[in-house]
Amino acid sequence: MASDKDLKVQNLNDQIDYMRDLITDLLRDQEIAHEEIRYLSDFISYKKLDEEYRYFRENAHEEYEEDLPFPILTL
């Protein structure tokens, strides 16, 4: 029969494994987002939209749409 201490240690090990999985997933998501940003940045440069992007970045504001649960950036 497992002692109380053994059960607590097992519980902590399970929690560590769970947190390790969460961190791994977050790092994978961050890599994907970083790659997407790289493609978007290069696309902006390729299409020579740097000035338009800067203008949008400096002047955009959030607006809420009735059919969307979150705001979108618009000019």
Image (spheres, rainbow, N blue to C red):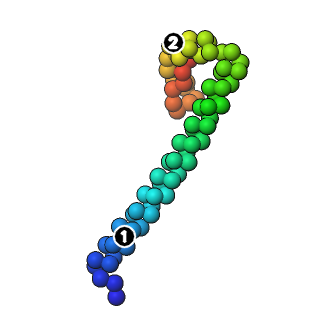
Under circle 2, the secondary element is: helix
Q: Residue at x 50, y 13 (%)?
A: 58
Point out the residue furthest to the right here. 47
Q: Is residue 43 left or right of residue 62?
A: right
Q: Which residue is mark 1?
A: 11
Residue 36 appears in which quarter of the rendering?
A: top right
User: Label 1 neighbourhood size at 10 Å, few (<14), some (14-19), many (20+)?
Assistant: few
In the image, residue 51 above or below residue 35: above
Q: Which residue is mark 2?
A: 59
In the image, residue 19 above or below residue 74: below
Q: Is residue 1 left or right of residue 23?
A: left
Q: Residue at x 34, y 84 (%)?
A: 2
Q: Residue at x 59, y 31 (%)?
A: 37
Q: In the rendered structure, which amino acid carries the disc numbered 2?
A: Asn
Q: Position of residue 73 (x, y in %)?
A: 54, 21
Q: In the rendered structure, which amino acid carries the disc numbered 1?
A: Asn
Q: Position of residue 7 (x, y in %)?
A: 33, 76
- How many marks can you see? 2
The one nearer the camera, 19 or 50, is 50
Q: State the mark number for residue 74.
A: none
Q: Is residue 72 left or right of residue 19?
A: right
